[in-house]
Image (cartoon, grey):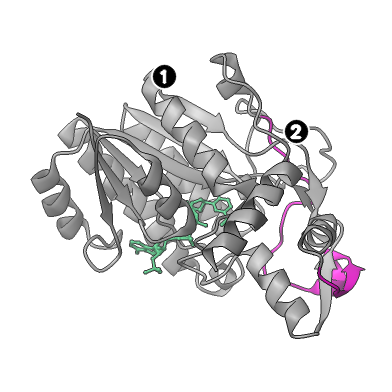
Amino acid sequence: MKKHVVVGANGQLGHDLRARLEGQVTGLTRPEFDLTHPEMMRARLTELGPDVVLNCAANNFVDRAESEPDAAFAVNAFGVRHLAEICRDLNCALVHFSTNYVFGLDAQRRTPYVESDCPGPISAYGMSKLAGEYFVRATCPKHFVIRTAGLFGVWGSGGKGTNFVELMLRLAKEGKPIRVVADQVCTPTFTVDLALATIALIQTGRYGLYHLTNSGSCSWHEYAQTIFELAGVQARLTAVTSQEFGAPAARPSYSVMASKAYQTLGFPQFRPWRQALVDFLKERSLSQ
Ligand SMILES: NC(=O)c1ccc[n+]([C@@H]2O[C@H](COP(=O)([O-])OP(=O)(O)OC[C@H]3O[C@@H](n4cnc5c(N)ncnc54)[C@H](OP(=O)(O)O)[C@@H]3O)[C@@H](O)[C@H]2O)c1
């Protein structure tokens, strides 16, 4: 029976992975496994002796990372480097999650990125995540680095305390005017679909870099419109440009990714994001 350790176990992805992995599963949260405390990490993992560590923990505060890059790098780059060293020393596999925000520098790009495309982040967060990817790939031979995008999960976002769907539904309920950018395109992704694909991928033993998202794409404004349509909610929604919105961090205008490496292994493309969103909203209403 394989021993799995899920780091960042209370985040939205950590929760869904923990619930679906087979074998022995230990979920670790920040107080007992902090990515900025290497000795704590080494002691805990040595004691547990896992076959596979799945790292779902991250500093995901994209805007805050612009003014606090050290905090983002401490977790997303150097913390991940320590984790990769420990996994290498314990000869266990490391599954690490990264982001579509490692792209963006090519402002003209309008076709999905594949794994062999050169990344180019445009934010401190994206740079910290890219550094983390490189540390994993250079340090721990048995690795899966999985880039994903726009996660929504029923357990909300542990780190941020919300996700985009929850935020939109809360703002609509409060009757507030809602401004959402229409010039950033990516692929919203259901954490359940990502968790199931990750588990299938681990079983292949084909280590490497993978893009895993639902299929299709939309702007954040189209995504918000779809959330309100499917949830049957009235909202005061306006489309704005990124410049009008004025977020502290720049985000890619196009960061759609194709799951090419995953499909090359014989797996099917993920279902469309809209279909996944229907299931998410059903599951969400059952859990409330
Ligand atoms: N959310 C997205 O839209 C998105 C998009 C692309 C990629 N990703 C990547 O996908 C992965 C999972 O994202 P998610 O949305 O599931 O994350 P999440 O819900 O925000 O959860 C992140 C978890 O990381 C933990 N954490 C933060 N700092 C830590 C530290 N120093 N040590 C240990 N744990 C720490 C948080 O714990 P606390 O609750 O104690 O803070 C939280 O439980 C991440 O690698 C993320 O970068 C996410």
Whether pointer 1 and pointer 2 mark residues with C-beta atoms closer than 8 Å, the reply is no
Q: Residue at x 71, y 57 (%)?
A: 251
**Foreground: 82 or 288?**
288
Q: Residue at x 63, y 39 (%)?
A: 213
Q: Residue at x 46, y 66 (%)?
A: 158
Residue located beneath label 1 in the image: 206
**Foreground: 284 or 23?**
284
Classed neighbour count for the residue bearing mark 2: other residues with Cα under 10 Å, few (<14), some (14–19), many (≥20): some
Residue 127: in magenta span: no
Residue 179 drawn at (x, y percent): 83, 74
**Foreground: 207 or 71?**
207
Span shown in magenta:
233-258
Furthest toward the front, the residue is 286
Image quadrant assignment for residue 165? bottom right
Residue kind at label 2, given as amino acid type: Pro
Residue kind at label 1, given as amino acid type: Arg
Residue 46 drawn at (x, y percent): 11, 45
Residue located beneath label 2 in the image: 112
Count of marks placed on residues:
2
Res 255 seen here: no
Q: Earlier in the sequence, mark 1 or mark 2?
A: 2
Q: Quadrant of the N terminus?
A: top left
Classed neighbour count for the residue bearing mark 1: other residues with Cα under 10 Å, few (<14), some (14–19), many (≥20): few
| Apparent side of residue 115 relative to residue 8 in the rendered image (left or right) | right
Q: Secondary structure at mark 2?
A: loop
| Apparent side of residue 277 relative to residue 43 in the rendered image (left or right) | right
| Apparent side of residue 183 relative to residue 152 in the rendered image (left or right) | right
Using the numbered discs, state the Cα–Cα distance from disc 1 to disc 2 in whole angstroms. Answer: 23 Å
